[in-house]
Amino acid sequence: MYHISDLRKYLRCPRLFQLSFNEKSTSFNPYVRLDQQVTELAIEKLKIDDYFLGVVNDEPDKALDAMNNYDWIVKGRFEYKNLRIKVPFLHKNEDGWNLYFLFIGNFPHEDDVLFYTSTVWVLINNDINIKDINIIHLNNEYVREDELDVNKLFVISNHFYNAKNNKASNVKELIFRKMRDYSSILSKMNNLEENELVEPKRVKACTRFGKCKYYDDCFNEEKIEDNSILTLVSSQYKHHMYKDGIRYLKDVDLDRLEGSRKQYAQIRADENGGLFYDKFGLSLWLSKIKFPISFLDFEWETFSIPPYKGMKTYDVLPFQYSLHILDENNNITHKEFIGFNDTRLDLINNLINDIPLEGSIMAYNGNAAEKLRIKELAKSFPEYKKQLMNIHSRIIDLQFPFDLGLIYDTRMKGQYSLKRIMSVVDEVGYDGLEIDEGMKAVYNWRFVDRAVNNEEKEEIIKNLKLYCAMDTYSMIVIYRWLKKLVVK
């Protein structure tokens, strides 16, 4: 039995399908938080009273039989040629059924049309007459009050949206125009299960919409040399050059080089034996940093359904920060905050009290993270706007010199995360931490209130604090490294 996710994987890469299909399933941690059952909220929106509700492992005949007795089918399981689907909502009308897809996002786009076409293909081949098709999706303009308003939370739409989130193709028309017979593909998938593992082949699909989870298993680039041409960032020709015998950054074919600042820094680093830095440019940037220097890092959660007043769909809620303060005498002070439930006001008040009134504030990727979070808080709580925007105005992005190509160490291997740079500067870094990356912090925070006992809860909180503190401490280490380089 296959699901649409298997079909999607096969069409992206047969090897991906093989590896994932034979892999033991593990628990899935979603990127966004869903504390409420969206299906139940959508039932309220559609004003459904009496309905058949499908459950996991239902036989496909069960939903088909229920269609004789119910006007509404919710989460019905259907199957055709070994492809099993789960249909959010089917509603009987005079001469057929209206289909409602449920999209837990603000704007359903056409790029996932396979999900919609394969669903309708299975239904049609079960002799279900589909009359109309709509998509229930979240309303990006909805702002929550004290209580959640389900009628305003959702939009029922008969069209997709384009890249600019404007109305585009009619849902039903596009589905029937794009729909194909998936029988031969399903047959190939079935045959592939019995064959040996397909040899890896590097194609654009390997990294489109994010790197495939099996990419490193297929190509093992972690074992490549630090100065390998394969570490060249934003290069569409690096694999071609590698096949042509060009192994190292310093030997790059200039005719196949895009010529970005980052690429220039990488090549110069290889030519210099592993490290390049623009002493003048780096000195100029560092000269703008004023003491006391506050090193700030936030952790936050993303909610698809707004849980608190003033929040919108897919708003974020900062729940933690770490703050290391470095003064002119090289003394370090550490302050931190972690909260639960609606943390916003407590975080704002603690941050305003903890952070110095003057001096620079350093944050890694701060322009896209901390500055944005502070601006959002200032908008939600205008009574604190003056203090928050003062903090906002003093934030300097520590990632800037790396993005601008002012410095590069080949041991970074084309990766610019705080964790990677710290591994170059400090041998210990994040090693040994129970929580060692951002999404792990989010997952742990989600489950604090579900901890079995206080001891387990305190252990999670301790690990969260250690991770966030390591982020800000890492910034101090990297800042000192940059300072040391320019005084050589």
Image: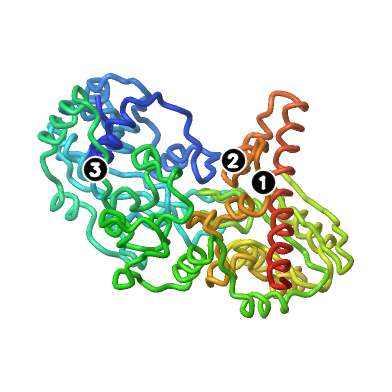
Q: Which residue is mark 1?
A: 427
Q: CA distance from mark 3 to mark 2?
A: 41 Å
Location of residue 191 (image quadrant): top left
How far across and how far down the image is residue 251, in percent? 37, 64
State the CA–CA distance, disc 1 to disc 3.
60 Å
Comparing labels 3 and 2, the label whose residue is closer to the camera: 2
- x and y percent of residue 207 in the render? 35, 51
> 262 left or right of 434?
left
Q: Which residue is mark 3?
A: 98
232 to the left or right of 329:
left
Instruction: Give the SS element for disc 3.
Output: strand
- Marks 1 and 3 close (CB-CB < 8 Å): no
- Image quarter hosting the N terminus: top left
Residue in the image at 70% along x and 48% along y = 468
Looking at the image, residue 89 lies above or below residue 339: above
Quarter of the image holding residue 393?
A: bottom right
